């Protein structure tokens, strides 16, 4: 039986191969709602306010209540796991007991929900620095649990942890073929919630959208 480290290494090799070949077809299963066209994303990016990020002072994930109840015993994480997975089976408390998840960030496939994180495409800390520090708790809760826009997506857990709170000028998905989609999602969320972008972030997003 291969170790988890060995399995992760094999998926990393496959993802690197996909990056080098420039292919992504058949890899990305997770598709959050509300992803705009490239044309729309470019227009929305042009409309965003460009300014230096604000302070991190006062930030806490607790100020963005997330994984709230969404009805039928399911919280936000469980809803996204079911939405983004294939053949997902849940128990009476809505916890996923089996299924398959293909992470569009790196192309890895997982069959245990514990290997999958629900990524906030625009990280909570980034949102704090770019406008959310002045929001009410209710507004931050709505942002952190947004199921109507491309803000939540199921991805490989350690890839999500590597991303952390970085913006696109600091981190991009390992799969180059997903950069266009990632940029469209990022811009859509910033536009919807009236968050700002810094100049390096806008340059990176412009380049990524240019690949669409």
Image (cartoon, rainbow, N blue to C red):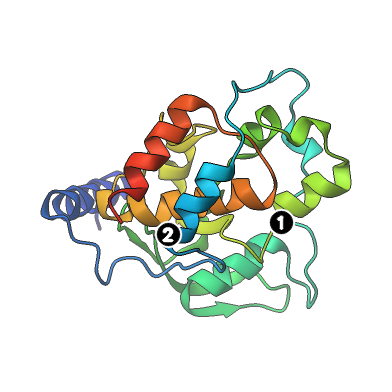
Q: Is residue 17 visible?
A: yes
Q: Secondary structure at mark 2?
A: helix
User: Number of numbered discs present?
Assistant: 2
Report the residue at 72% width, 50% height from top: 143
Position above or below: 96 against 118: below
Position above or below: 80 against 166: below
**Residue occupied by mark 2:** 39
Coordinates of residue 152 in the picture (x, y in percent): 58, 57
Q: Is residue 180 left or right of residue 44?
A: left
Report the residue at 77% width, 42% height from top: 64
**Residue occupied by mark 1:** 145
Position above or below: 182 against 169: below
Q: Which label sits on residue 49?
A: none
Residue 91 falls in image quadrant: bottom right
Along the line of sight, the residue nearer the viewer: 176 or 119: 176
In the rendered image, which quarter contains the N terminus? bottom left
Along the line of sight, the residue nearer the viewer: 198 or 57: 198
Coordinates of residue 74 in the picture (x, y in percent): 73, 70
What separation in Å lies between label 2 and label 1 (alpha carbons)?
Answer: 27 Å
In the rendered image, which quarter contains the C terminus? bottom left
Residue 67 falls in image quadrant: bottom right
Along the line of sight, the residue nearer the viewer: 200 or 32: 200
Q: Is residue 8 left or right of residue 91?
A: left
Coordinates of residue 38 in the picture (x, y in percent): 41, 59
């Amino acid at each position: 039986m291969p170790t988890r480290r060995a399995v992760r290494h094999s998926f990393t090799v496959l993802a690197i191969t996909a990056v080098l070949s420039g292919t992504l077809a058949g890899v990305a299963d997770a598709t959050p709602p509300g992803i705009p066209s490239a044309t729309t994303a470019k227009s929305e990016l042009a409309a965003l306010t460009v300014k230096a990020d604000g302070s991190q002072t006062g930030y806490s994930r607790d100020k963005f209540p997330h994984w709230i109840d969404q009805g039928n015993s399911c919280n936000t994480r469980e809803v996204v796991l079911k939405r983004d997975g294939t053949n997902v089976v849940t128990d009476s408390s809505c916890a996923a007991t089996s299924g398959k998840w293909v992470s569009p960030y790196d192309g890895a496939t997982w069959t245990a929900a514990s290997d999958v994180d629900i990524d906030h495409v625009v990280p909570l800390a980034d949102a704090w620095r770019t406008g959310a520090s002045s929001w009410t708790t209710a507004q931050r809760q709505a942002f952190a649990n947004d199921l109507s826009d491309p803000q939540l997506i199921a991805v490989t857990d350690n890839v999500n942890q590597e991303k952390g709170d970085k913006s696109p000028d600091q981190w991009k998905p390992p799969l180059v073929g997903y950069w266009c989609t990632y940029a469209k999602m990022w811009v859509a969320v910033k536009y919807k919630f009236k968050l700002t972008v810094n100049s390096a972030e806008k340059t990176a997003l412009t380049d990524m959208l240019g690949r669409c």
